């Protein structure tokens, strides 16, 4: 009994995992385990609960208000990016991208697999939602790949792996949440060791840091598919049919250019510091609405094209003139700039309203009447509510864990490991990798990282500075978290793909198909670990 009482903090994790595997909802499991162990801690008189009550949990209110504080704008980007991704998926823009790439690369050996990897990258950069990407590519690409005699293991492996690129390629919801949590943990840890002016880490730094490793991962996927097609041509044959003729350049540009412009505008505005992640997410959401409006009525795209011109006029006017209207003195040049900016905003509003009208009306989708905008908004609310409810449950869990002395236990364990900081980093990465077999990335981000990351950031180098770059740690953890969606037996991407795969594809084919791609992820993760400049070069340059 004394052993159990003295290790109540560590027993919280197996208790939560067992309940999650039993099928209980994540948010309520985390909160319930937290409250239960707080009561047990108060009964046993452990840690901050030694007084016999659970008043320590009152700090939960300050944490939640900190989440909703008007100064914390980062997490507002989460529902906006979710809406952007869902709107692109519901409107059919993602499916059109996939079909076009299949025609472009299908004639090459392994061309369909290469096209899936490229479209997975584009969808990751424009949506950041793993489930929607995997389902979309599974519904469209998998039947075509199987019909052209692709090996089911290779087909399902590349679809599942490409679908998880939304975890690491910005703008990723995972990177937004991870960056926000790690930024707070970094500042707190550095101040605890006497560094009272640590250099803050922004979400833009995390996005810039993840860009090169994410593209490297895509490149290795493509190389692997090409090698399989060369070594075993029967596993990934070329596709030559009447329907697979390459589209004309004009048609290709009309399909690829709008999503690429949207990606560049969103990522570029964040990485170059033009806009905050929340402002960029708003740009992405508006751009997704415009693209959906074009998709609904491709014969009449004047309002949407005019809207793009209008927003370009606003950007140019803001660059050339001072558009602050609260000044006491306005010169003639700035008044002219304000006029053009106002006209540009009016034109943009017209195009946006027209797109909203089109997406609100009924649309034929496989002989089923659907409202694209209504479905996108409903899905956005559901997914956003899920994310933030899990966040609240995780706060209860973490607060109880700290109240029971768990933070000190983890810190002592990591600092006492033989081999020093690098072994501690390897231990944290190993724990995250193993938990990815059983837990979703949200549980790992909200529960595990706030507990383990501060110890990593408390290590100093010879000059007394932080030994580990927070951007580098964020990218390593992002790559590691990607395995939580891909690794058997509980990878969510595997479940998504199993739900849309035909009965002829066995579950064992899916599991065996993703193993080479899990190995690729581990290799890329090790490469970034050995050469931190892959993650830190671009943020430092910018």
Image (spheres, grey):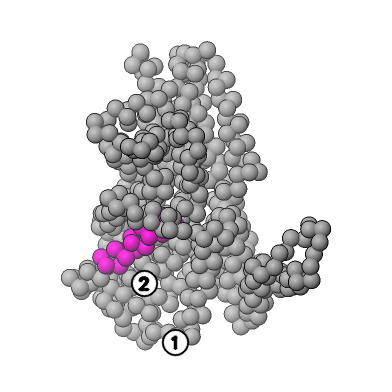
Taking depth in this image into account, of 274 and 103 the one nearest to the observer is 274
Q: Main secondary structure of the magenta part?
A: helix
Residue 418 seen: yes
Left or right relative to 227: residue 335:
right
**Element class at badge 2:** helix
Residue 178 on image: x %, y %: 46, 46
User: Where residue 56 appears, x then y in whole percent?
Assistant: 55, 22
Residue 219 position in % (x across, y down): 32, 65
- Comparing 465 with 440, the one in front is 465
Which residue is identified by label 2? 115
- The span shown in magenta is 208-225
Left or right, 133 with respect to 430, comes to right
The answer to which quarter of the image holds residue 146 is: bottom left
Q: Is residue 539 left or right of residue 436?
A: right
Which quadrant would the N terminus be assigned to in this image?
Answer: top left
Q: Which residue is mark 1?
A: 248
Q: Residue at x 50, y 28 (%)?
A: 399
């Amino acid at each position: 009994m004394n052993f159990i009482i003295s290790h109540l903090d560590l027993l919280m994790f197996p208790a939560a995992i067992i309940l999650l595997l039993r099928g209980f909802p994540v948010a309520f499991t985390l909160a319930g385990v937290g409250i239960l162990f707080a009561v047990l801690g108060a009964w046993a008189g452990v840690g901050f609960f030694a007084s016999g009550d659970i008043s320590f949990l009152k700090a939960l209110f300050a944490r939640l208000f900190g989440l909703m504080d008007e100064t914390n704008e980062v997490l507002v980007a989460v529902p906006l990016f979710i809406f952007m991704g869902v709107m692109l998926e519901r409107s059919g823009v993602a499916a059109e991208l996939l079909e076009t790439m299949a025609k472009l690369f299908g004639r090459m050996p392994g061309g369909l697999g290469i096209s899936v990897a490229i479209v997975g990258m584009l969808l990751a950069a424009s949506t950041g939602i793993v489930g929607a990407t995997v389902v979309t590519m599974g519904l469209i690409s998998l039947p075509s790949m199987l019909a052209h005699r692709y090996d089911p293991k290779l087909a399902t492996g590349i679809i599942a792996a490409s679908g998880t690129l939304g975890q690491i390629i910005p703008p990723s919801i995972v990177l937004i949440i991870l960056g926000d949590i790690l930024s707070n943990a970094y500042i707190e840890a550095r101040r605890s060791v006497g560094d009272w002016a640590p250099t803050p880490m922004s979400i833009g730094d995390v996005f810039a840091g993840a860009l090169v490793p994410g593209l490297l991962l895509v490149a290795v996927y493509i190389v692997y598919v090409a090698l399989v097609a060369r070594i075993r041509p029967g596993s990934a044959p070329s596709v030559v049919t009447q329907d697979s003729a390459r589209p004309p350049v004009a048609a290709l540009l009309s399909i690829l250019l709008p999503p690429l412009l949207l990606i560049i505008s969103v990522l570029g505005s964040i990485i170059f510091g033009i806009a905050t992640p929340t402002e960029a997410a708003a740009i992405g959401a508006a751009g997704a609405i415009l693209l959906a409006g074009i998709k609904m009525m491709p014969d009449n795209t004047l309002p949407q094209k005019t809207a793009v011109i209008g927003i370009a006029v606003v950007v140019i006017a803001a660059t050339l003139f001072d558009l602050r209207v609260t000044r006491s003195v306005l010169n003639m040049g700035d008044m002219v700039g304000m006029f053009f900016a106002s006209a540009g905003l009016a034109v943009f509003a017209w195009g946006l309203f027209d797109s909203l009208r089109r997406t609100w009306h009924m649309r034929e989708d496989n002989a089923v009447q659907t409202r694209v905008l209504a479905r996108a908004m409903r899905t956005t609310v559901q997914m956003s509510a899920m994310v933030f409810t899990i966040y609240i449950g995780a706060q209860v869990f973490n607060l109880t864990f700290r109240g029971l002395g768990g933070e000190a236990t983890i810190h002592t364990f990591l600092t006492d490991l033989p081999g020093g900081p690098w072994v501690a980093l390897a231990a944290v990465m190993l724990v995250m990798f193993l938990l990815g077999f059983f837990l979703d990335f949200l549980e790992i981000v909200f529960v595990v990282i706030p507990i383990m990351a501060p110890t990593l950031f408390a290590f100093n180098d010879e000059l007394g500075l932080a030994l580990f770059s927070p951007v580098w740690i964020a990218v390593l953890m992002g790559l590691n978290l990607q395995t939580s969606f891909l690794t058997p037996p509980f990878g969510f991407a595997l479940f998504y793909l199993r739900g849309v795969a035909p009965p002829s594809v066995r579950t064992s084919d899916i599991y065996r198909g993703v193993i080479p791609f899990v190995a690729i992820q581990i290799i890329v993760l090790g490469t970034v670990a050995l050469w931190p400049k892959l993650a830190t070069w671009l943020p430092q340059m910018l």
